[in-house]
Image (cartoon, rainbow, N blue to C red):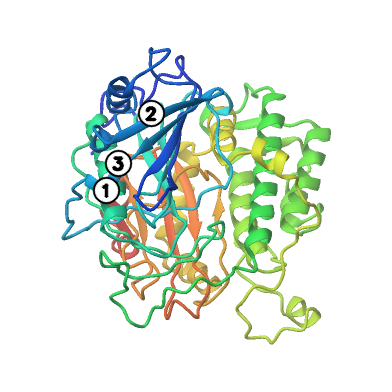
Amino acid sequence: MYSLDEPMYEPRRLLDIQEYELLTIDYVQGTADMNFSFFFDTPPYQCQHPDISCLQESLVEATQLFPILAGHIVSATEKGTRWKVVVDPSNIKWPVITECTTPLTMNYLKEWRFRWDKLPREALMVELHLLPSQPLFAAHIVRYACGGFSIHTKMRHQAMDGNGLFMFYHTWAQICSNLHCGKPKISFNLAHRPLCSRLICASKMDLAGNTRNKKLDLVAVPNTNEAKVCRYMSKLEVFLRQLARSHRQTKLVPSVPSHMHKFSVSQSALHRLKITFGTLTGCSPTNAFFKKHKVSYVTTNDLLLALFWQAITRAHERISPKDPHTCMGVACDVRKRIGLPQTYTGNASFPLPIHLSKKLMRRHTVTDTAAYIRYHINLLSPEYTHLMSRFMASAKSMKQFFEMFHPNTSFFMASIMGVFPMYQQNDFGTGGPIHIDIPAYLAPGCSIWMPTNPKLCTNEHLHINIALRDNVFELVADDAEFRRYIDIVY
């Protein structure tokens, strides 16, 4: 079992950021002879005027991602600060993949690109765009200082053929090899993501891109809630950043035990948090949670636990809970006020009074937000981890939690640590059981996913991923009720 103190592999950088800021490879469909091109920002090689052989060598050695393309570069042209490299893949012998197992999540991915100078030190990221034929993927490889790493991916086209499968599989295998993580096993288990340009849903796909489950149809349906979810997530990120800034302005209280992680918050900072919290969740700044904390002492655990519950419920519907720590009741008067039947389970409305500009949204990235939380708030303290595990170990709490989300409800992802992807999506969106996966070695994180579009998914379920810092076996080894919903993942 891995831990944060015992990384899976020897820490090493995927790329040398001192040589170049960002390696961006854009594969664009070329002419009829199947040529396609990519670009290097600030060339990652020492040759000032490279020839074809130099580029081939650099492509393999500098990136360590695409050795299969060596020998197929046909031209290289300098375009200002970029190099356009044209590759002819027509003679590449693509291996046939007969089986892909163990999911690699096709994850939520922001539309904008990240730059090295905007990233925190512990999260190095490479953006890749792959288009050997019809499929187009975008992948972010994220490295963590604790020794973990993850890949965020997105497919932008409906079709998927053998070439696309192999190119992505080959890239992922090379990354794992470079990180000493062994040979990966991959399946493309696709589900809706709100920021994808094309919505795709399939239980399993063959190499020709056909669904094996005939009940599911590969039809691109626009997501009307896309902009709302995007704006809400941006506001949630802004709130967390403000929370981090307020914590940096405080001093630890010596009289409080360190394991309680209490900190003193100025009244003005607390007032700003109230206003922002109310804007995000649609609740009054004088709600029960902040009434409880009239003094200037707020525990990290209480605040973030309340934020966790408020976020997932407020974004789902305009709910007015009696207790923000439980958020289990749905106010019928809200349904009546907006003209919905009492049994309605879809999206009522999103409390989104403010629009963030695209420039501002680029600045407040999920990665940056998560880094601030980890460093300045110490989100998952042992006490917080214990509190969450106790909640999930309660059969009553779990039952109420699942009942809060009914199948066919609208999509929403509430992520306190949004940089962490979902792992091990067993039968996600295909009628599988509701369960929780806990990667035992990942850095702390918490994500909640709900699929969308009941027309394409016949039986959708909630899927939760919580990465704990503590020894998971010790937490749940003797808890049969807890293990009903939990999978320990390595």
The mark found on residue 90 in the picture is 1
Which of disc 1 and disc 2 is earlier in sequence? 1
Residue at 40% across / 59% down in the picture?
Answer: 393
Which of disc 2 and disc 3 is earlier in sequence? 2
Q: Residues within 10 Å of mark 1 (few under 14, many from 20)?
A: few
Residue topped by disc 3:
171
Residue at 54% across / 59% down in the picture?
Answer: 197
**Could you give the CA–CA distance between mark 2 and mark 1, rounded to whole angstroms?**
41 Å
SS at badge 2 = loop
Where in the figure is residue 374, as x and y percent of width and height?
53, 32
Q: Amino acid at mark 3?
A: Thr
Q: Does the residue at mark 3 contact the one at mark 2 (Cβ under 8 Å)? A: no
* 369 up-or-down from 274: above or below: above
Q: Amino acid at mark 2?
A: Cys
Corner quadrant of residue 436: bottom left
Q: Residues within 10 Å of mark 2 (few under 14, many from 20)?
A: some
Q: Is residue 97 left or right of residue 363?
A: left
Residue at 68% across / 22% down in the picture?
Answer: 251
* 338 up-or-down from 475: above or below: below
Q: Is residue 229 left or right of residue 44?
A: right
* 187 up-or-down from 63: above or below: below
